[in-house]
Image (tube, rainbow, N blue to C red):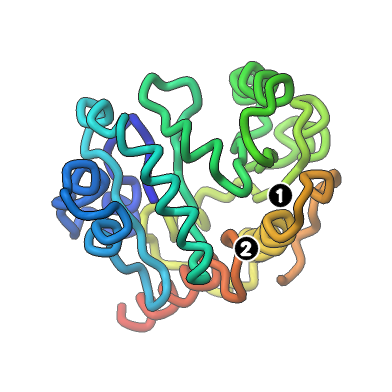
Amino acid sequence: MEADPVGGSAILAGWFQGARDHDMGLLDVAFAAEPVGEVLDRVAIGIGDTVRFVPGARSHLQARELRGLWQPLAEALAGLDATGQDVIVDAGRLGMAESPQALLERADLTLLVTRTDLPAMAATRSHADLVARTSPWRRSGLLVVGSGRPYSASGAAKYLGLPLAGSIPLQPKDAAVYHQGATPRPRFHKGAFARSLHTTAHALRAQVAIATPSAAPTTEPEAVPGRGQVGVAGPASVWAAAADRRREQS
């Protein structure tokens, strides 16, 4: 689910390469007379066989219209757990005026995502300090992209004072398979990038399954076969399968 208050849909523009109109999404949920859960089911767009997503606001000007939606939406999403459905929410940058705070607070696991270069670490530090000091979320963690540039994943976690939830290598060409709909390179699904997604998926699944944040890994996970959020088949494996199908059709 896209809940970035900046607006626009990275998935419609990237994965679908602009071939799908942004004609439905959270704004429809906010203004509908029906219960939130029913409208969510209607506006969700399929990605593969088992994954669906809900587009966010079309622009930052529409984000203010979603203020009253976050709390009932958080309750509706929490209810999906009973049906075995897992939800991943892209909340965008922290500190925005229309950030979906209720979703962040209600989530089983809320992650700060950052690169390890100095500008990124400096920008993340103030938010990490606030999270560590005030504990606004049920369970918090750090997801690192591009370890060793120059901080290691474990070094970044130590510097920011948050438990390390996972580490994904900075490989723009491989990442473009998901965020730009690019054609996977040969042996893509056996490469370090795909393996890191699976490893991170298992780490996140374990953290969601337990009752305390202390079980979050404190060392950098190795890229071994094993992502997504929770469930037997994580979103990464579904995305991979969808990418395979697109490659076969091309």
Query: In the visual, does 150 lie left or right of 5?
Result: right
* Near-viewer residue (118 or 111): 111
Query: In the visual, does 36 lie left or right of 233?
Result: left
Q: Position of residue 177 (x, y in %)?
A: 44, 60
The residue located at (31%, 82%) in the rendering is 249
The image quadrant that residue 16 belongs to is: bottom left
CB-based contact (under 8 Å), mark 2 and mark 1: yes
Q: Secondary structure at mark 2?
A: loop
Q: Secondary structure at mark 1?
A: strand
Query: In the visual, does 227 lie left or right of 244?
Result: right
Q: Amino acid at mark 1?
A: Gly
* Near-viewer residue (217 or 239): 217
Q: Position of residue 62 (x, y in %)?
A: 21, 31
Q: Position of residue 191 (x, y in %)?
A: 64, 66
Q: Marks 2/1: CA distance? A: 10 Å
Question: Is residue 98 shown to the viewer in this render?
Answer: yes
Where does label 2 land, which residue?
Answer: 227
Where does label 1 land, which residue?
Answer: 166
* Near-viewer residue (196 or 124): 124
Question: Is residue 188 shown to the viewer in this render?
Answer: no
Mark toward the start of the polypeptide (2 vs 1): 1
